């Protein structure tokens, strides 16, 4: 068992409160003698117990000391043994032997047990409160670890995002990159979008421009027109991030690009009467 597991096992609290078994006590003493960290933790527990019992100590009822002393003083004292002498006791007299009252010693034992019980309850309460504080501390430490891990993941995600943006910036500035403006059709209103196509490096980016957000059961779908035939370039979600969308795959020698509004998930062929924007590749 490592030091941290030994310290958090609760054996130190049992030892400090006098509830440890002889084997546990020997183990604690050996560990404290060989490991300063264990000794320091044990000292801290003892201080906590002392502080708690000092605050929560139960004072005995007033007048208890006087009553105990009166009981003790009223108890018969032992008499020295005397040499026995034959003595004739008159038949008309009763022999009387004083009987010791057991009430005084019984009451003292009860009071001592009562005080010891209160002290034990106080020690157990202190151990319980200390354990609660330790558990709360563990919970806070774990929460801090979880928050740190989440921050690390967020930081990694931001780094990856920044790296992707840097690559997009370099790609857009490449001399062979062509920006293709997709303008609105009669049903598109004032909508527009832009496709960045580079045949030399083989990439395509898409800027959704000001396309409106469709209903939940619809999605916009991008098409490339090659030799008069539409080729699916994928569906996309309209959002407010204004980020470029990297299109997977590459189309050789497209004549135009267009966007149609399709059922969610896309269609195998474009719905021509739902074409919102279109633009030719010059």
Image (spheres, grey):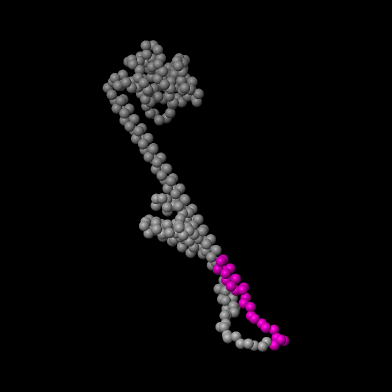
Residue at x 42% of width, y 48% of height: 141
Residue sitting at the far right: 92
Residue at left offset 56%, top offset 83%: 80
Image quarter where the C terminus lies is: top left
Q: Can residue 48 be seen in this view?
A: no
Q: Nearer the viewer, residue 214 or 130?
A: 130
Q: Nearer the viewer, residue 52 or 105?
A: 105
Please name the residue shown 55% across and 63% down the image. 117
* In this view, 232 is above or below 63: above
Q: Can residue 8 be seen in this view?
A: yes
Segment tinted magenta in the rendering: 90-114
Q: Please tell me which residue lies in front, 95 or 193.
A: 95
Query: How far across and how far down the image is residue 259, in percent?
Result: 42, 19
Q: Residue extending furthest top?
A: 228
- The number of callouts visible is 0
Q: In this view, does 61 lie above or below 223?
A: below
In the picture, residue 248 is in which quadrant? Answer: top left
In-image side of 185 versus 252 (left or right)? right
Compared to 164, does 25 lie above or below?
A: below
Residue 111 on the magenta segment: yes
Q: Residue furthest left?
A: 175
- Horizontal and vertical percent for residue 7? 42, 53
- The residue lying at 59 percent from left, 78 percent from top is 75
Percent across and percent down for residue 252 are 33, 16
């Amino acid at each position: 068992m490592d030091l941290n597991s030994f310290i958090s096992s609760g054996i130190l609290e049992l030892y400090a409160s006098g509830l440890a078994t002889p084997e546990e006590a020997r183990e604690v003493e050996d560990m404290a003698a060989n490991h300063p960290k264990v000794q320091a933790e044990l000292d801290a527990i003892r201080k906590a117990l002392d502080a708690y019992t000092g605050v929560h100590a139960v004072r005995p009822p007033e007048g208890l000391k006087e009553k105990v002393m009166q009981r003790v003083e009223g108890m018969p004292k032992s008499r020295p043994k005397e040499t026995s002498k034959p003595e004739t006791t008159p038949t008309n007299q009763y022999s009387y032997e004083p009987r010791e009252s057991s009430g005084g010693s019984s009451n003292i034992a009860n009071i001592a047990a009562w005080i010891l019980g209160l002290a034990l309850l106080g020690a157990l309460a202190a151990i319980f409160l200390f354990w609660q504080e330790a558990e709360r501390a563990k919970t806070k430490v774990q929460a801090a670890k979880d928050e740190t891990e989440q921050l690390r993941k967020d930081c990694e995600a931001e780094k990856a995002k920044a790296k992707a943006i840097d690559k997009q910036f370099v790609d857009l500035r490449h001399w062979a990159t062509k920006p293709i403006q997709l303008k609105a059709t009669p049903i598109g209103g004032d909508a527009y979008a832009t496709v960045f196509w580079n045949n030399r490096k083989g990439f395509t980016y898409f800027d959704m421009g000001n396309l409106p957000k469709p209903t939940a059961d619809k999605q916009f779908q991008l098409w490339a027109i090659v030799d008069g035939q539409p080729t699916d370039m994928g569906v996309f979600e309209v959002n407010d991030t204004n980020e470029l969308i990297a299109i997977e795959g590459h189309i050789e020698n497209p004549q135009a690009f267009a966007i149609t509004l399709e059922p969610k998930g896309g269609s195998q062929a474009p719905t021509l009467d739902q074409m919102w924007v279109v633009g030719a590749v010059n």
